[in-house]
Image (cartoon, helix red, strand yellow):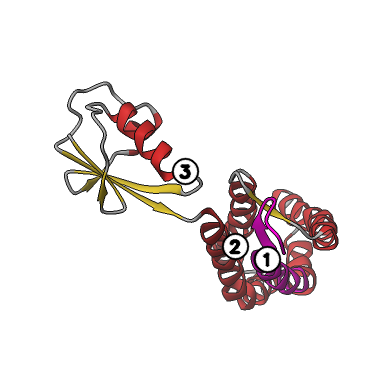
């Protein structure tokens, strides 16, 4: 089985997917494996979660890697861009609630909340990347403060919708979340620009 990492063939004798993954990860070092293809097609997610022992797994396996720092920065900037694009929609959904059109507003609200959820997921994923950290205590404190202030507002919307109190949901959407959103767009971008390899000099 031919095994490649970023178009470079590895001197690997692995014939199973678990063996190939181990060899590719060892060769990648601090870089992250972001894509795996077998004979030109993406490997099914279930095979990555529980790699089969089929031997040989494929004729050719290709692993694509990325620098961990660049990947984290890209993830955070993409989250900021997604949030920035959604900001005008907060007022639009609030207006729908205010005029009593909850049937149209609720699906749009779900999409907005998904944007906030993806930001949380992006931050969680970034925390799991070994060797990358934020060497700026002041910015870390600012992030924690912003998170503490945002959580109650998202909870207010959730509780208001559950209680069908759409007027309260509209108020949070129109007057609170846009301000939080603008702060988070700026904060995510600053975090992205201030992360570094742990132990690296500024």
Q: Is residue 114 magenta?
A: no
Which residue is drawn at the image coordinates 68% and 52% (left, top)? 133
For marks 3 and 2 on the same chain, the one whose residue lies earlier in the sequence: 3
Residue behind mark 3: 29
Secondary structure under tag 1 reads helix
Residue farthest along the top direction in this orientation: 53
Q: Earlier in the sequence, mark 3 or mark 1?
A: 3
Secondary structure under the numbered disc 2 in the rendered image: helix
Label 1 to label 2, Cα distance in Å? 6 Å
Please indicate whether residue 58 sits to the left or right of residue 97 in the image.
left
Q: Residue at x 58, y 68 (%)?
A: 77
Magenta segment, prevailing SS (helix, strand or loop): helix
Report if the CB atoms under discs 3 and 2 are less than 8 Å apart: no
Q: Residues within 10 Å of mark 1 (few under 14, many from 20)?
A: many
Q: Is residue 96 above or below residue 12?
A: below
Q: Nearer the viewer, residue 118 or 9?
A: 9
Residue at point 73%, 73% (across, down): 178
In the picture provided, is 65 more to the left or to the right than 60?
right
Q: What x and y, as percent, mark residue 160?
A: 75, 54
Residue on which disc 2 sits = 76
Q: Dots 1 and 2: beta carbons under 8 Å?
A: yes
Give the quadrant of the C terminus.
bottom right
Question: Residue 154: horizontal and vertical position, in percent?
Answer: 74, 56
The region drawn magenta spans 178-202
Res. 188 mark: 1
Residue 81 on image: x %, y %:
57, 72
């Amino acid at each position: 089985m031919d095994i490649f990492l970023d178009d470079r063939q590895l001197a690997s004798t692995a014939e199973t997917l678990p063996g190939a993954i181990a060899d590719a990860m060892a060769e990648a070092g601090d870089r992250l494996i972001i894509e795996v293809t077998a004979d030109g097609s993406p490997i099914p997610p279930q095979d990555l979660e529980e790699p089969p022992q089929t031997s040989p797994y494929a004729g050719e396996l290709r692993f694509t890697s990325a620098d961990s720092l660049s990947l984290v920065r890209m993830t955070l900037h993409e989250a900021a861009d997604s949030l920035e694009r959604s900001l005008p929609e907060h007022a639009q959904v609030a207006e729908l609630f205010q005029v009593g059109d909850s049937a149209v507003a609720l699906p749009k609200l779900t999409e907005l909340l998904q944007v906030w959820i993806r930001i949380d997921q992006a931050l969680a994923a970034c925390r799991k990347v070994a060797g990358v950290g934020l060497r700026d205590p002041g910015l870390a404190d600012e992030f924690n403060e912003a998170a503490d202030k945002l959580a109650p507002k998202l909870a207010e919307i959730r509780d208001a919708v559950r209680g069908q109190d759409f007027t309260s949901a509209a108020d949070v959407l129109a007057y609170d979340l846009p301000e939080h959103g603008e702060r988070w767009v700026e904060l995510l971008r600053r975090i992205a620009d201030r992360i570094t390899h742990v132990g690296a000099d500024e």
